[in-house]
Amino acid sequence: MSYTYSKSLDYGGSAASGGGAAGNPQTITNLRAGYGASGFDQKHRFVSSINYELPFGGGRAFFRTGVMSHILGGFQVDAITTYGSGAPFTATLNSGVNSGSPSWPNRIAGRGKIDHGTPLRFFNATLCPVGATSLADGTSCAFQIPTANTYGNSARSVLYGPSTKNWDIGLQRRIVIHNEMSVAFKLDAFNAFNTPNFATPNAALGASTAGQITGTVNDNRDLQASVTFYF
């Protein structure tokens, strides 16, 4: 088992790593304002690998002899479990206020994060007009539109996307043919439980799907069968 706790900070994505959903600073005249978590930052990561030989068959705890020994013997199970925290993303304005230049909103008192957010509303993307903290119907806003031709005070990489989890499982049976010769039959299931890992949400405030997640970052379950001859 391994666990990694880490933090990566920079001023913008590079050509090699990409900016991810964190993107680059609003302006090159004040790079310090773009200092934040890297697009590839992952605060927590846990990986567990297991290889277990089932206790059946000759030389094992159960069914050491007889027909059942030949039927159940020689099996082993492999499993890899991976958990990771989400990637950072930056809230932007769908319609900018800087004549086509990138525009970030003003953030209201650290708002935006929702505990147990769902793909339909992962974070509070409610956007208020300049200077307002709520809409006419009383809905509380997390962000404001800044004054025209100014830069919003919301930070880069201000929020984090959903966490990821995955299980890869393999079942293998090895049969001895003669002396050092054996053959192994194996079935692997990648993303064995077909668990969807959601992408970062649409963070373009003012868009119809702002705050929503419309994609995943992993493949569906994949099955793989193989035969290996050892000699």
Image: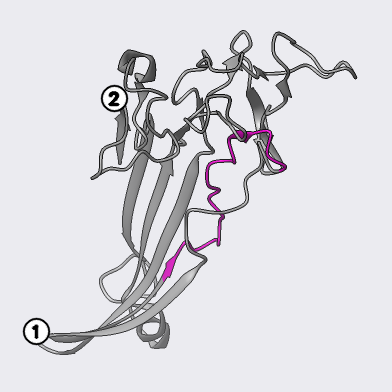
Under circle 1, the secondary element is loop
Q: Residue at x 40, y 34 (%)?
A: 23
Q: Residue at x 62, y 51 (%)?
A: 214
* Image quarter (top left, top right, bottom left or bottom right) of the N terminus: top left
Q: Which mark is residue 82?
A: none
Give the quadrant of residue 74: bottom left
Q: Position of residue 103 (x, y in %)?
A: 52, 26
Question: In this view, which residue lies farthest toward the bottom?
Answer: 178
Q: Position of residue 24 (x, y in %)?
A: 37, 31
Give the quadrant of residue 129: top right
Q: Nearer the viewer, residue 165 or 138?
A: 138
- Nearer the observer: mark 1 or 2; the answer is 2
Under circle 2, the secondary element is strand
Q: Nearer the viewer, residue 13 or 191?
A: 13
- On screen, residue 137 versus residue 14, left or right, reads right
* Image quarter (top left, top right, bottom left or bottom right) of the C terminus: bottom left
- Circle 2 crowding by C-alpha within 10 Å: few under 14, some 14–19, many from 20: some
**Residue 87 is inside the magenta segment:** no
For the magenta stretch, what is the residue range? Answer: 189-208
Residue ID for mark 1: 180
Question: Residue 134, relative to residue 56: is it above or below?
Answer: above
Q: Residue at x 29, y 24 (%)?
A: 10
Three-letter code for the amino acid on which mark 1 is drawn: Glu
Q: Position of residue 17 (x, y in %)?
A: 27, 43
Residue ID for mark 2: 10
